[in-house]
Image (cartoon, helix red, strand yellow):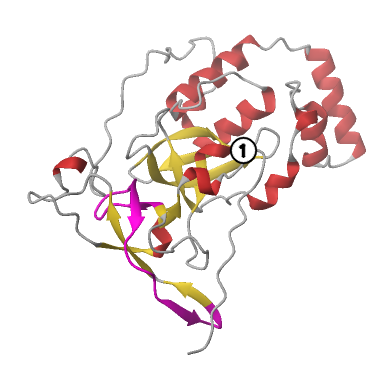
Amino acid sequence: MPPPGLSGTIGSGQKRKATKSSHSRSYPRGVGLDFRKLGGLTLVSYIDHHGVQVRPEAPPSELAVAVARHFEALEVDEEACIGGFLERLSEGTTNPTEYSRETQHYNGYRLSVKRRRTRFAARPGEQVAAKVTRTDENGSWILASVQRFYIDTETYDVQDEDDTSKLIRLPWSHVMRLSTGTEGCFDKGKDVMAIFPETTSFYKAKVAKSPVWELERGIPCVKEVIVKFEDDEDQYGRTPHRRVPSRYVIPAPLDYFYDENEDVDLIAPTTTKP
């Protein structure tokens, strides 16, 4: 069982309790289409394309209501719509990418995008550490999976690995890629964050022992790290050593985002033969 200091830890088999949203509204009766049957990513694509305002933590049900209300409020010029359709039909198949660019909602911010971050962004399906609270307390970073990265706004849509019922919109600085075991952030005494055993939450810790570097396919890497977690003392006031897979040991946020305008640049240490 987790120590007293981590009594609030959430186990991997447990679900976080969802708070009832005061922002959800009833589905508009005047809309014949049922957007609630669409997947979360499809709804997000519609919202991103048309610039619909939604809460970052809105669940799919709320996204469906927002899309339906936006769709209901659209003023359509039937003659222009039919004329445009016939014109595109006569010209042949329209490139969907070009069509999206021509009709996409402009929000006034796209000209100042730092596109250089795109090549460092986590990919869809990739597990990451995600900060889902406004505080820096233990457990504010959780294990999540990336659903989408928005180039223009440098934001992510992620899903909590313990609760896949909703999408969470997060800024670049609230998402950290997991370790590959090759980074040089495992030195003894280094402050890190690591997943506490049998949970999916990251907690502050300190590397207790120098890691063992091994060659895997010719690349030096660390497979596990021995750490001491903060507030993990037993009844005698002793803090136990705990083994954590290196994948789930990451730098402290201040080390990872060493400058909010810069990208992470971690370098594996060189190894010498004995």
Q: Nearer the viewer, residue 253 or 159?
A: 253
- Residue 237: horizontal and vertical position, in percent? 12, 49
Q: Amino acid at mark 1?
A: Glu
| Vertical position of residue 82 compared to residue 113: above or below | above
Query: What stretch of residues is rendered in magenta?
Result: 192-219
Q: Which residue is mark 1?
A: 260
| Image quadrant assignment for residue 96 | top right
136 w.r.t. 207: above or below: above
Question: Residue 81 falls in which quadrant of the image?
Answer: top right
Q: Can I make out residue 32 in this image?
A: no
Q: Above or below — where is 58 with respect to 219? A: above
Q: Is residue 203 magenta?
A: yes
Tell me which corner region of the image, top left, top right, bottom left or bottom right, holds residue 211: bottom left
Q: Residue at x 57, y 75 (%)?
A: 270
Q: Nearer the viewer, residue 108 or 101?
A: 108
The answer to which of 136 and 133 lies nearer the viewer is 136
Q: Is residue 89 visible?
A: yes
Residue 28: x and y in percent read 49, 11
- Relative to residue 262, is residue 205 drawn left or right? left
Helix, strand or loop at label 1? It is loop
In this rendering, the count of numbered labels is 1
Give the residue furthest to the right: 91
